[in-house]
Amino acid sequence: MATNRTFTMIKPDATGAGKTGAITKMIEEAGFKIIAMKKVWLTAELAGKFYAIHKERPFYKDLCSYMSSGPIVPMILEKENAVEDFRKLIGATDPAKAAPGTIRALFAKSIDANAIHGSDSDANADIEGNFFFSQFERFEK
Ligand code: UDP
Ligand code: MG
């Protein structure tokens, strides 16, 4: 399994605010190579599948409706130490606690509408990338 890849998605609050380009620019300027990228609109059911790990948490239902409220931009990214470095680039879940200059500090509206996702482990990066990108699509190996 790759240890130099992570998975991200720009969330509906940020795509809706026209920040896809600004966020993608920050990602590339931080040294991440975009391996795969597309714009899609999830149903609440599919959002629920993606976030199944959180299904016992109180915010799960709201999270599923928020994540299906507008388009998202999923991407597979590559960089040395990708998972950890990307979590640093996006900042804490709650933008009020995110370090200055991080993507969430700059673009997130709230703890739920927080602009961007970043995988928390190599194993989850692999699972989450495979959720959105089929092995039958041609993208950089
Ligand atoms: N979330 C929320 N309320 C909370 C915690 C999380 O709405 O109290 C949402 C938020 O969009 C977050 C996602 O659920 O990004 C997944 O939560 P997690 O704890 O995995 O945070 P992350 O890994 O995204 O920083
Ligand atoms: Mg998480």
Image: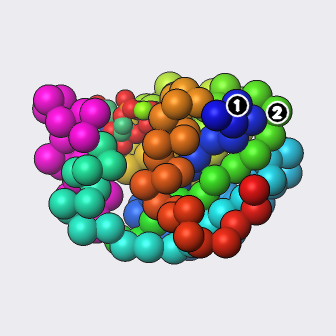
Question: Given the current orientation, which residue lies at the most extreme front position?
Answer: 136
Nearest to the observer: residue 20 or residue 41: 41
Residue denoted by label 2 = 80
- The scheme the figure's colours follow is rainbow
Quick check: is 65 in the magenta stretch?
Answer: yes
Q: Which residue is mark 1?
A: 3
Question: Which quadrant would the N terminus be assigned to in this image?
Answer: top right
The C terminus - image quarter: bottom right
Q: CA distance from mark 1 to mark 2?
A: 8 Å
Observer able to see residue 47: yes
- Report the residue at 19% width, 60% height from top: 45
- For residue 3, side relative to residue 131 (left or right): right
Residue 61 image position (x, y, % from top left) = 14, 47
For disc 2, the neighbor class at 10 Å (few under 14, some 14 to 19, many from 20) is few
| 72 horizontally vs 48: left or right | right
- Magenta residues, start to end: 52-69
Does residue 95 appear in the picture of this structure?
Answer: no
**Considering the numbered disc 2 on the image, is that residue within a helix, a strand or a loop?**
loop
Say which amino acid is labelled 2: Glu
